[in-house]
Amino acid sequence: MKKFLLFFLLISNVVFSQGSYGEWEQKFEQLGTMLPTPNSYRTASGAPGVDYWQQKADYKIDVTINDENQTLYGEEEITYFNNSPDVLRYLWVQLDQNVRSNESNTPLVTPSKMSKTYSGKRLQGLTNSYTNIKGEKYNGGFKIAYVKDMNGKDINHSVISTMMRIDLDEPLSKGDSYSFKIKWSYEINDRMKIGGRGGYEYFPKDKNFSYTIAQWFPRMAVYDDKEGWQNKQFLGRGEFALPFGDYELNITVPADFIVAATGSLQNPKEVLNKIELERLEKAKKTYDKPVIITTQQEAEKKEKNPISNKTKTWKFKAEMVRDVAFAASRKYIWDAMAVQLENKTPLAMSYYSKEGNPLWEKESTVAVANTLKTYSKHTIEYPYPVAISVHAASIGMEYPMICFNFGRPNEDGTYSDATKWRMISVIIHEVGHFFIPMIINSDERQWTWMDEGLNTFVQSLTQREYYSDGPLRRGTAESIVDYMKMPKDMLRPIMTNSEQIASREFGANAYAKPASALSVLRETIMGPELFDYAFKEYSRRWAFKHPDPADFFRTMEDASAVDLDWFWRGWFYSTDNVDVGVEKVKWFKMRNISEPFENQAKVEEENIRGKNKKLPSDPVDFAMPFEPTLFSFTNTNTNEYREFRNTVNDENIKIENSDKNFYEVTFENKGGLVTPLIIEWTYEDDSQEIEKIPAEIWRFNEKIVTKVFVKDKVVKNIKLDPLKETADVNTDDNNFPRLVIKSNFDRFNN
């Protein structure tokens, strides 16, 4: 048997072989004071504390839509409960419709540029010359008729743009409640001309309207332990923060209208005919496909013979919701099906005009049902009785139990795959919002990513589970690469208020990047089982409450035992990106003791000088670019080494490691964002192995790290991030040896 000498490095030498620590950028420092100090309201674990409190606001609302002049008239009674330990001398009410008033600040603070070409819609926006359906100048914003107490006495109030302060005659102490009334109206906006989250769409061919009504009534602002009153002005992008409450909603519309709304319909026998009632009852027991409640033929008949001189009032109730919205039209086709969850059986429903068919009848309600199932699995079980998707021509928007969604075929009923998949993805996204943030109630006006980013992430899980044959535009590591490689002056951290992000980057920053970050966290860093447990714990803790970012960050760590401060710091607080390269590889073999050491030393010297390097001559030749360097035992007389020699059987170690290959690999972090190292080793026999090194490998040096890997086989290629799991923005340096990639011009010439 040949005798070999083992090359051995003491533990201390391994540690210090990394070299100097390098410039310290605190990438592994704890977030510490960057997060709010824990207290009895919000604990250091991320859970609500023993003294956690939140306010409540109940509403009784009567609303009428005038289909002749497209005006909404409303009266409401608000009862506000002060559960805080504070004494309140005034209340704040949100007036979101004022964003479209003549006095709105939004046009003044919105940058604009001239262009050689302008669409009519953009030109109207530039000149603020919007018109209504009659060609008259649009006059938006709330018209407040009165604010009174329950005795009919006028209450002092002040309107400050999109907020209204209610001045109380007597301070509102802890445990007290206060009721008051508001009467208002506003001219409904044309969604197709003016835009907006709610409004109407006019169909000139049959001269009918579809109303999707949202952010339509004066609503209480949030008062909480973090900020006091959340009375940040609404400029159009940052959506809203609202307290939970119970609602009674009475909606008066033309008698032939179908109405969809947040909550349970209280008077179906008064507003539906006998056939519709029978179909609705059948839908409650049907799980395999939607039941048509109002058919296309019935809807078209109403379009041609509208009833304009009679009205009906649809009555709804909703408990523990933060908002209500509704849709109304005589054009609506209506279908529904039951969804069997673990303990509940909500109705998935869709309302759509003939312009949405055949696509909507085929896909909408099924997508609602699929979304309820996936989100119930990953967050909490859906607690409400209905989940509604309403057809609209423009982008999607969500409210508790109801959302308005894109997806219109061509006039002849045909549609492309792109239209179908976009519609399905929008429906999943907007129905997903019923969970986040309509139940797990984050502050959208301050932290858009807690709403859009978390929801986009779970949307991607739904699409993977039910629509794996369709495109997945967001929610993967690879999908965010183009955005993260943009110039730093065009980027903002995820932890940026929504109003401070340019429109062109808003979708990527608030939706796509957080979703990709959580995908990396789930698939690569924590693993699905551990991530899912922690994410579900966050959802359980903060359902029907008001979480902030610290509550999410802390819960994910608390429920997983994984220190993720480096991850939040890099992905959420910085604009760094992942760009790691394999910069250097050295191959070591054990020296054969039977050969003269002088010869081996010569080979070693030649290798170091690079005389024996073999560079690949062809892109498919992955041979390592050098011969192995041979080493013998370290010759030392230190007491530490002698002690080691006395406790280890050197001969056995030599034999066990005689055929090992030692690869010293140096990685460089060029993008600044620390990341796990996922290494694909390809061996001489073409077998492969994937090895994962946690991100903490960078904790001693955030720029350069060197690590020795011991392999039984000879390696012919090393590839970093082979499945594109880390969002590496430059993969040209991920292979060793480097791949020779021919340009398209070279290929053409050949």
Image (cartoon, rainbow, N blue to C red):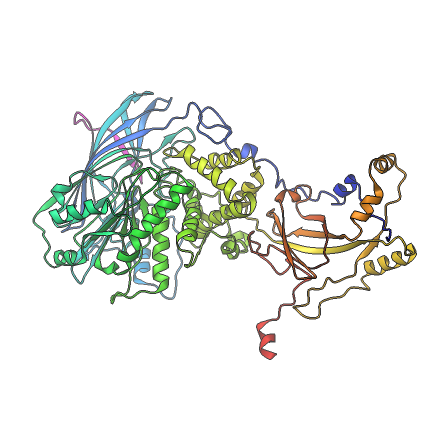
Residue at the spot 34% in from the left edge and 28% down from the top edge = 55
Q: Which residue appears at 39% of the width and 63% of the height?
A: 115
The residue most toward the front is 1
Q: Which quadrant holds residue 688? A: bottom right
Q: Residue 101 in the image: x percent, y percent?
A: 27, 46
Q: Residue furthest bottom?
A: 749
Q: Quadrant of residue 687?
A: bottom right
Res 13 seen here: yes
Image point 16% across, 59% down: which residue?
A: 297
**Of 610 and 139, which appears nearest the observer?**
610
Residue 736: image location, x then y, percent:
68, 59
Residue 603, position as x, y percentages in the image = 86, 59
Q: Residue at x 56, y 41 (%)?
A: 569
**In the depicted view, which residue is nearer to us: 377 or 637?**
377
Does residue 543 appear left or right of residue 683 in this picture? left
Would residue 43 appear left or right of 639 to someone viewing this image?
left
Residue 478 sits above or below residue 171 on the image: below
In front: 77, or 606? Answer: 606
* Residue 626 belongs to magenta span: no
Outermost residue toward the left? 309
Residue 524: x percent and y percent?
55, 47
591 sits to left or right of 53:
right
Where's the C terminus, which quadrant? bottom right
How many numbered discs, if any? 0
Query: Magenta segment range?
Result: 148-163
User: Where 330 sits versus 166, above or below?
Assistant: below
Q: Which is more toward the observer, 141 or 549?
A: 549
Q: Is residue 158 magenta?
A: yes
Q: Is residue 236 visible?
A: no
